[in-house]
């Protein structure tokens, strides 16, 4: 009887230990949003779709379940034509992210239309002698985050993730070394303008004109270290470093940027729950809250950095503590799939701390209302490196 009781007592903990969050989440997304992920966002050829699929891609590379490959391909084929032209290209760095899906599908299927589509993306951003780029730049040559008046002369470190892991990977595949110089210039310019060397963290954005309401009138930076900006930035650096040639003159500077960021990330982790908060360096301040999407992106970046031997192996413990905290923010939704809680909704740069914490967290999915993709993105990415 004692043996039976002990086994029964252990069953709940054993069941929880066997949960594979990556498979659970990826499978649920495929079921929830049909026929493609665009049924969730209706944003078309944009990062809000492709970043989720990029996370599913990483789960696929671990479990090789063909339904995930079919799901990613179905999205791309909505927009990519046989000649590599693409419907619905956007003049935003956010709209550059689907390029990673093109490269993934080319590598998995061998279909050259996806490589042609990747070239279309490259030409869209960089331009060609026949058709110059329509993307705007600051006087120093940094791409605006979006080519519209609201983002005039604004660089955001978010944009580094949207464009440059793709561009660097494409540069290696297509042997276009000059693209490495383009990516390095943008990455290091954004780091130089947005980075706080005391905190080792990036501000949300930077305005060349220093005219935006949120911009510091002397430095042009926004005022706070936002969780998801640091998440995007950390993933950008580690994913770029995965492909960036070590003999390139900029490699060591990009590596130093990542190693310095890791220090700031370590210092801003809440030791109690292992998470990173909406405003990173103020987890103990009123109204601040644990922010799951940024935390999960950070976990991915740290663990991948350890795996690639870019940072000290001791950062695994930081990532593991963060992953444990993230799992406390995952509940079971009424469809049996996971619900990701405590996610900051989309937002631009806010004027001050109060502005950031006034925007309260959401869950995804919800019974009614918008389904925000960001929680999905981070947890998929974290699961891809934290689970065997």
Image: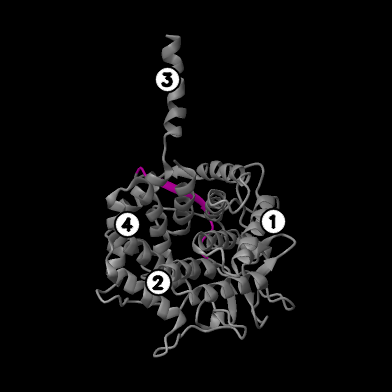
Which residue shows up at 34% across the image and 48% down it? 27
The numbered dot on residue 174 is 2
- Mark 1 and mark 2 lie on one chain; the one further toward the N terminus is 2
Which residue shows up at 51% across the image and 45% down it? 329
Tell me, yes or no, if residue 67 can be seen here: yes
- Mark 2 and mark 4 lie on one chain; the one further toward the N terminus is 4
Q: Is 345 within the magenta?
A: yes
- Mark 3 and mark 1 lie on one chain; the one further toward the N terminus is 3
- Pointer 3 residue: 8
Taking the image as shown, residue 154 lies to the left or right of residue 365, namely: right
The numbered dot on residue 33 is 4
Q: Secondary structure at mark 4?
A: loop
Callout 1 crowding tier (Cα within 10 Å): few <14, some 14–19, many ≥20: many
CB under 8 Å between discs 3 and 1: no
Tell me, yes or no, if residue 279 can be seen here: no
The numbered dot on residue 338 is none
Q: Is residue 249 above or below residue 331?
A: below
Which residue shows up at 59% across the image and 42% down it? 321
Real-space CA distance between mark 2 and mark 4, rounded to the nearest whole angstrom: 33 Å
Segment colored magenta: 336-346
Q: Secondary structure at mark 3?
A: helix
Which residue shows up at 54% across the image and 67% down it? 158
- Pointer 1 residue: 281
């Amino acid at each position: 009887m004692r043996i039976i009781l002990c086994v029964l007592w252990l069953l709940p903990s054993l069941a929880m230990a066997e949960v594979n969050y990556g498979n659970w989440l990826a499978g649920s997304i495929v079921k929830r949003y049909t026929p493609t992920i665009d049924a969730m966002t209706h944003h078309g050829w944009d990062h809000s779709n492709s970043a989720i699929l990029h996370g599913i891609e990483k789960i696929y590379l671990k479990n090789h379940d063909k339904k995930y490959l079919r799901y990613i391909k179905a999205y791309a084929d909505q927009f990519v034509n046989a000649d590599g032209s693409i419907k619905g290209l956007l003049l935003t760095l956010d709209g550059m992210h689907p390029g990673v899906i093109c490269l993934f599908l080319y590598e998995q299927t061998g279909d050259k239309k996806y490589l042609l589509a990747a070239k279309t993306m490259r030409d869209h951003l960089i331009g060609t002698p026949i058709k110059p780029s329509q993307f705007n730049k600051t006087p120093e040559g940094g791409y605006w985050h979006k080519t519209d008046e609201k983002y005039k002369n604004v660089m955001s470190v978010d944009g580094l993730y949207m464009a440059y892991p793709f561009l660097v990977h494409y540069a290696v595949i297509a042997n276009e070394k000059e693209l490495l110089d383009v990516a390095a210039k943008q990455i290091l310019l954004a780091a130089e303008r947005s980075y706080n060397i005391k905190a080792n963290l990036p501000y949300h954005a930077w305005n060349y004109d220093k005219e935006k309401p949120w911009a510091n009138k002397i430095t042009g930076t926004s005022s706070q270290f936002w969780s998801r900006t640091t998440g995007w930035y950390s993933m950008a650096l580690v994913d770029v470093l995965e492909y960036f040639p070590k003999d390139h003159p900029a490699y060591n500077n990009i590596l130093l940027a990542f190693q310095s960021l890791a220090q700031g990330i370590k210092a801003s982790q809440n030791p109690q729950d292992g998470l990173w908060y909406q405003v990173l360096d103020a987890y103990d301040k009123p109204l601040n809250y644990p922010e799951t999407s940024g935390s999960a992106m950070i976990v991915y970046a740290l663990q991948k950095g350890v795996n690639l031997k870019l940072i000290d192996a001791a950062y695994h413990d930081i990532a593991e503590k963060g992953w444990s905290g993230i799992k406390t923010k995952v509940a079971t939704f009424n469809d049996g799939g996971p619900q990701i809680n405590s996610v900051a909704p989309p937002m631009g740069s806010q004027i001050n701390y109060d502005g950031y914490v006034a925007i309260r967290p959401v869950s995804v999915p919800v019974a009614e209302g918008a389904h925000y993709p960001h929680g999905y993105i981070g947890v998929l990415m974290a699961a891809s490196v934290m689970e065997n």
